[in-house]
Image (cartoon, grey):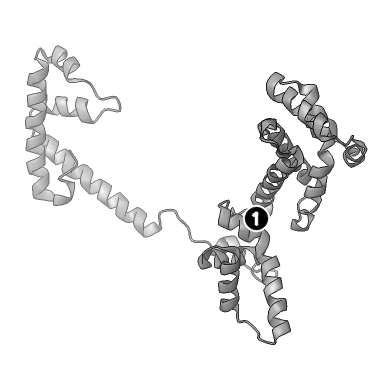
């Protein structure tokens, strides 16, 4: 769409050469897009304010994101602003677009700051972009007054300044203090150093658990076979068809095959389960709820 024209190396130059819209022209273009979905009007509106998007994107370069990506996100924010702008409210488009551009860039920066999601609540976003600035100012003020502040007191002051809970400050401080590292990196400089991934706990079933689980399954299978042996041939057939098949049969289909009513098959099934339950209860109470 309109932003496609800026996806090349001449983006900044084209943006700086774009026209400056007066309030009347801006309003006319906004109405043309809102009421008539005139894409030429949209393109002209976005082109005129692309320099604003680029300028705002440049302010976030310190977070390590590629400038091209920041500009692209700024462009998306600009397009969202154009799509949602209501010219009847009497606000200049640039004033309205600033919020959308900034929000789009901030979301991108936070998504790509770390493989571990930093968070997207309002308090987390406010901390992410203001913690270092507020901390630096508080440290300057403390140094000027000759009253040093310990780390815990600093966190409390930052929380009060930004208006967020203390635990959010502690969490964000930890996340901003380091970078992501590969789990295949060695823990020491030695040639045979163990990789960090080897220190992770295995979530899978351990050997002892596998043995216990296999033993329990074998025991349960033995109990069930014994319980089935207490049934007559017709009862065993009903139980196997109803409970031991991957695709259990219906009472009606069994009734048709055995020449019985559906209700009679249900009664035989209930009686068979009753016999098996009594047998199982004598073996272990742990399988009382199996049926």
Image coords of residue 270 (percent x, y): 9, 30
Quadrant of residue 241 in the image? top left
| Foreground of the two, 108 or 252 | 108
Residue beneath the point at 9% across and 19% down: 263
Q: Which quadrant of the figure contains the C terminus?
A: top left
Quadrant of residue 80 in the image? top right
| Foreground of the two, 105 or 33 | 33
Q: Above or below — where is 177 with respect to 115?
A: below
The total of numbered circles placed on residues is: 1
Query: Which secondary structure lies at badge 1?
Result: loop
Residue beneath the point at 63% across and 53% down: 115
Residue beneath the point at 7% across and 36% down: 274
Q: Label 1 neighbourhood size at 10 Å, few (<14), some (14-19), many (20+)?
A: some
Image coords of residue 226 (percent x, y): 13, 40
Q: Which quadrant of the figure contains the N terminus?
A: top right
Q: Above or below — where is 57 with respect to 175?
A: above
Q: Above or below — where is 76 with respect to 67?
A: above
Residue beneath the point at 8% across and 26% down: 268
- Residue 227: in sight, yes or no? yes
Residue assigned mark 1: 114
- Residue 182: in sight, yes or no? no
Most extreme residue toward the bottom is 146
Instruction: Specify whether 11 is left or right of 108.
Output: right
Instruction: Specify whether 115 is left or right of 167.
Output: right
| Foreground of the two, 1 or 220 | 1
Instruction: Specify whether 119 is left or right of 39.
Output: left
Image coords of residue 46 (percent x, y): 79, 33
């Amino acid at each position: 769409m309109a932003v496609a024209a800026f996806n090349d190396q001449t983006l900044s130059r084209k943006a700086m050469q774009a026209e400056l819209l007066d309030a009347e022209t801006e309003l006319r273009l906004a109405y043309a897009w809102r009421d008539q979905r005139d894409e030429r009007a949209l393109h002209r509106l976005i082109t005129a304010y692309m320099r604003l998007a680029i300028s705002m994107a440049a302010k976030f370069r310190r977070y390590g994101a590629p400038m091209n990506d920041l500009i692209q996100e700024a462009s998306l924010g600009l397009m969202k602003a154009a799509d949602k702008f209501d010219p009847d409210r009497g606000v200049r488009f640039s004033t309205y677009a600033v919020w959308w551009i900034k929000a789009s860039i901030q979301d991108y920066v936070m998504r790509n700051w770390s493989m571990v999601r930093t968070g997207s609540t309002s308090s987390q976003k406010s901390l992410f972009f203001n913690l270092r600035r507020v901390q630096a100012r508080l440290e300057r003020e403390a140094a000027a007054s000759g009253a040093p502040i310990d780390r815990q007191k600093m966190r409390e002051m930052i929380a009060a300044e930004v208006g967020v809970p203390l635990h959010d400050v502690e969490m964000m401080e930890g996340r901003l203090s380091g970078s992501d590292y590969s789990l295949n990196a060695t823990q020491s400089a030695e040639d045979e150093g163990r990789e960090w991934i080897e220190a992770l706990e295995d979530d899978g079933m351990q050997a002892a658990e596998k043995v216990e689980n296999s033993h329990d399954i074998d025991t349960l299978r033995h109990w069930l076979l014994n319980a089935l042996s207490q049934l007559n041939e017709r009862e065993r057939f009903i139980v196997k068809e109803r409970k031991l098949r991957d695709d259990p049969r219906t009472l009606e289909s069994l009734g048709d095959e055995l020449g019985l009513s559906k209700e009679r098959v249900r009664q035989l099934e209930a009686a068979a389960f009753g016999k098996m339950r009594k047998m199982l209860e004598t073996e272990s109470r742990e399988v009382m709820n199996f049926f």
